[in-house]
Structure formats: C-alpha cells, structure tokens
Image (spheres, helix red, strand yellow):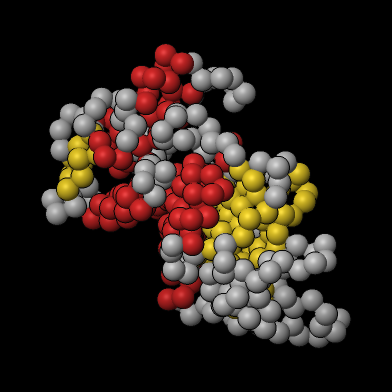
Amino acid sequence: MQAMADRGSGNAGHPRGGTAPQGGWMQREQLALGAALTVQLWAEDRARGAAAMAAVLAEMQRLERAFSARRAGSELALINAAGAQGPLLLSAELCALLGRALSFSRLTGGAFDVTVAALAVQQEGRPATAAPDDAGLARARQAVGWRLLQFDPLQSSLRFARPGMRIDLGAFLQGHAVDRGVALLQRLGIAHAIVSVGPHSRVLGDRRGKPWMLAIRDPQHADAALALLPLQDLAASSAAPRRVLDPFSGRPTAGTRSVSVIAPEASTAAALAQAVCVLGPERGLALVEGLADVELVLADAEGRLHLSAGFEPPPAAAEPTMRLRRSA
C-alpha cells in the first residue's frame, strides 16, 4: 500500500528564516477500497490536521476489511459464500447499508442493483475487450435481481433466493466511505476539506473563501475536462458507462460517454450515477429531475452535454465551468 504524502501546507510565501504560521492546507493520499483515496483539509494546527487525516484513513481501512466483497474474511465475502444456504444474520452496520442500497434499487426501478456482482464473476479471467460468453451470461443473469434478496431488516437477516447470487456494494461503498470520512472530519472540528475515493468526492465548506472546483473528466480524453463544477458542502460522483454492467441485459452499458451526479451525499451520488448509466440520457435526466437536491451532468455517446435544470445556462465561452443555481 502506497505511503501517505503531505502535498503542501499552504504556508508558502513566508519570509525566509521567518516562522511559518501554524494554519495551512494539508493533503494525504493512499489506496483504499480499491481506489485512490485523497484527503485535503485546512487545519489551524498541523498536529490536529494530521490526526484528523489519520482517523479518516483508519475508517476507510475498517470499511474495506468489513464490507469489501474482494476482501477474504470480510462480512460481505462470507455472506456471498453462504447466502443461499439459509438466512444469515447481518451486523447492524451492514443491515443499514444494504437497506439503503435496496432503497435506490426501488427508486431506480432496478437500474441500480448490487447483485450485478454475479455478472462480474462470470466475466472474471476474460480479457476486458472480450465479448461475454452468451451461455455463461445467460446463467449469470439468473442470479441477478435485487428482488431475489430475501432481506429482513427487522430480523437483520439475508438469504439469497438462488444459488450463485452475490453482492458487491462497489461504488456505493466507496461513496459511503467518503460520507463517513467527511462526518469524521466534522466531528473533529475541521471546517474546510475534500475527501475523495476514486471518482467519488464530497467537499466540506469551501476553500476559505473560494468554492472547490471539481473537474469532470472525459473518459475518451483523460487530459480534458468536460466540465468544471464549483461546489460547496456537496458531493459529486462520476461513472464510466463502459465499466457499469446493465442488470437487465448483463452487458456493459451504452449510450452515454460520461455520467456525473451532484447530491448532498456521496453515497447517493454514486448510486444514482450507476443507475443513470443504465437508464441512458433521457430516462436518466427524468429520474434526476424528479429528485430534490440532485443534479446531473451527462455526456451522450456523441459527447454532447446534457444538464439537469439546477444548472445555470452554460456560458458562451469555451470555459467549461457549470454553475449550480443554488450555489451562488
């Protein structure tokens, strides 16, 4: 695991030989939950800031140990191994996580579905560019469907209705981890920060008088930004459609080039971004327009941008900054 590194204190510019002020920006990076974790914050005291970042990292590692489907011995891995054998008791934390994930399945008509893990298993060991084996795909699809999860939140129990079913919280777990990280920083008295795990970010406060600027990357041109989003106290999650499996067809989604959702919480944004990849531009926009405090930036297959109604009209200039009406 890569060592964490301080990427700057915000104290540059003090006279040589003088005493640097205690307050400053601090940043740490490390791998967590299968993606790059970044924590950047302003701390009036560097020791306090370092302790806050260490607490976030420890929480990410705990969540990975407990709920990563790819982590041997995790609660989720054990459930995947025995879920068809009978009702299994869930920890209170996993019960709450799964219950919330299934609420997004209901909201999206199954476009967001944590049971697509059975499809991913079917593709394991095959080249990423290889077409799915039709017979294997048909078998795997029999084990996909959120309604096949016999979940009892009152008893904190779960059973798979069919053999071969699996759960992978994936992007939703990464978004949840971001939310947990931000909540930790708030409790520790941090007022200005950003926490990111892969393409899922949440900002706390602002950059001390300026908004945080998040870039939505073009997956076909890694060095280009489709849009720049000035955000404050919001979360954003992006999804690359070619990496999202359609729970209905079993194949990677098509029809969009990039999907980014802005919401109050990163877990909400992550679940909805996955769903919009499945639904496509028209139905995805319709879903988001029906939700409060959620916005969407979508690039269709031709690269045209589609924005939900919460954005101000795009500027005529080439600068790709997209401003939310509510974040003046």
Q: Is residue 9 above or below residue 83?
A: below
Residue 280 falls left or right of residue 213: left
Residue 76 drawn above or below residue 210? above
Q: Residue furthest top?
A: 135
Which one is in front, 74 or 199? 199
Return the x and y of residue 310 as percentages of the image width and height.
Answer: 57, 69
Asked whether 195 or 24 is in front, the reply is 195
Q: Residue at x 57, y 66 (%)?
A: 309
Residue 106: image x %, image y %? Answer: 32, 50
The number of discs equals: 0
Q: Is residue 204 visible?
A: no
Using the rendered view, name the quadrant where residue 128 is placed: top right
Question: In the figure, is residue 222 to the left or right of 284?
Answer: right
At horizontal 54% and vertical 49% (from top left) the residue drawn is 282
Q: Would you place residue 31 above or below residue 142 in this image? A: below
Q: Nearer the viewer, residue 50 or 180?
A: 180
